[in-house]
Image (cartoon, rainbow, N blue to C red):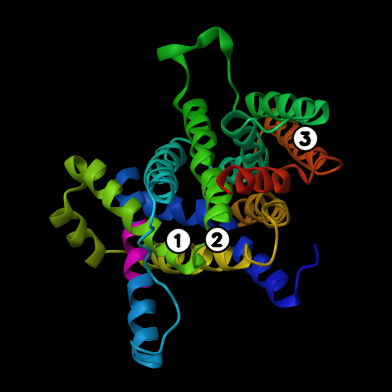
Amino acid sequence: MRVSLKTFLGFTFFNFVWSLNPLMGKWLLEDLSATQVAWLRYSSALVAYLAIVFGSLLWRGIGKTRSVYFLLPSNQRDWLWLALIGGLTFCASPLLQMTGLAQSLASENSMIIALEPLMTSVLAWIILGEAISLLQMFTLSLAMGGFFIFADFNFSHLGEEMSQHSWGNFLILTSLIGEAFYSILGKKLSASYSPVGIFGTSLALGVGCLTWMAAPSLDLVHLLGLLFAFKWKSTLAWIWMGPLATAAGYLFFMMALKEVSVVSAVFFLFLQPILGSGLNYVILGERLSGRQEWGGVLILVAVVGTFLGPSKSLNRVFRKMSKRDA
């Protein structure tokens, strides 16, 4: 599928933005807890989205605008899809990712993100019953082997004795489930609804869920006091991760899915481990061990191998879903 220059540049820019999210998250974690960072990122993204909506309505006129900023689906199935995107992508996933990042390196986060395309394929196989090829099974096994090497798992010390560092990497891996659901269900819903509306409604649902789950440890009064005492790094990280990477980035991603397939979109994710690891090395001075470098190579080889033959599998998934719903 051909991609326009505008979309290509957009994917390149936002993957650069997303590649810095782990670094920005580390800066915010210097002042806030993992739960506070997760809530601040997505609540500020919702505020930025509402500002965009308000500005657009004023510019175009409420009666003239054709955009649908929030959805009211006519059937329970579509409400379920939206609720799953909100609950997984904008609630559970950020909590897991920030908790994991607090216990690991930003460079490790950047590398684990490369597994998202495989995670998407696995969910299509498990949830939708989509056939999986021998090559995909092999690359999945290779990727998981690379992950366990990269995350420095020691199977002789499971349970309480497992290091926080290894657990952190495992939580980041688990958080990719939410991102994969956004790609699969977002693509499905975009056939019937405005991509902007899908994002707006699912983000609002997710922030509501995140606020409810995080409320016991959020301490909003204390958090607001911390915001006024932010260092420049934390202020930059807040704006970067919320309004830019989440509000603008996800909006672009949903609108771009009208033009390109999910496979084409997630292929750009290869930029993130490369850019992220390099920038984390320069800015944060993070160093991966030799064992982690070998694990990272296995992960990248596995993900690249996934696209050699069965790269059309996800497109078959969406056609299959459309037939089921017809």
Q: CA distance from mark 2 to mark 1?
A: 7 Å
Is 45 magenta? The answer is yes
Could you tell me what secondary structure mostly forms the magenta stretch? helix
Judging by the rendered image, the residue that carries numbered circle 3 is 302
Whether residue 33 is visible to the viewer of this picture, yes or no, is no
Q: Earlier in the sequence, mark 2 or mark 1?
A: 2
Circle 1 Cα neighbour tier, 10 Å, few/some/many (<14 / 14–19 / ≥20): many
Using the image, determine if residue 145 lies above or below residue 122.
Answer: above
125 lies left or right of 190: right
Secondary structure of residue under mark 1: helix
Q: Is residue 186 left or right of residue 132?
A: left
Which corner quadrant of the image does residue 47 belong to? bottom left
Image quadrant in which you'd find residue 151: top right
Of 316 and 226, the residue lying toward us: 316
Residue 138 screen position, x and y as percent: 79, 25
> What's the CA distance linking mark 3 and mark 2?
29 Å
Q: Tell which residue pokes out farthest to the right in this image.
A: 309
- Indicate the quadrant containing the N terminus: top left, top right, bottom left or bottom right: bottom right
Whether the residues at callouts 2 and 1 have beta carbons within 8 Å, the answer is yes
Q: CA distance from mark 1 to mark 3?
A: 32 Å
Image position of 148 with respect to 101: above or below: above
Q: Quadrant of residue 301?
A: top right
Range of residues picked out in magenta: 42-48
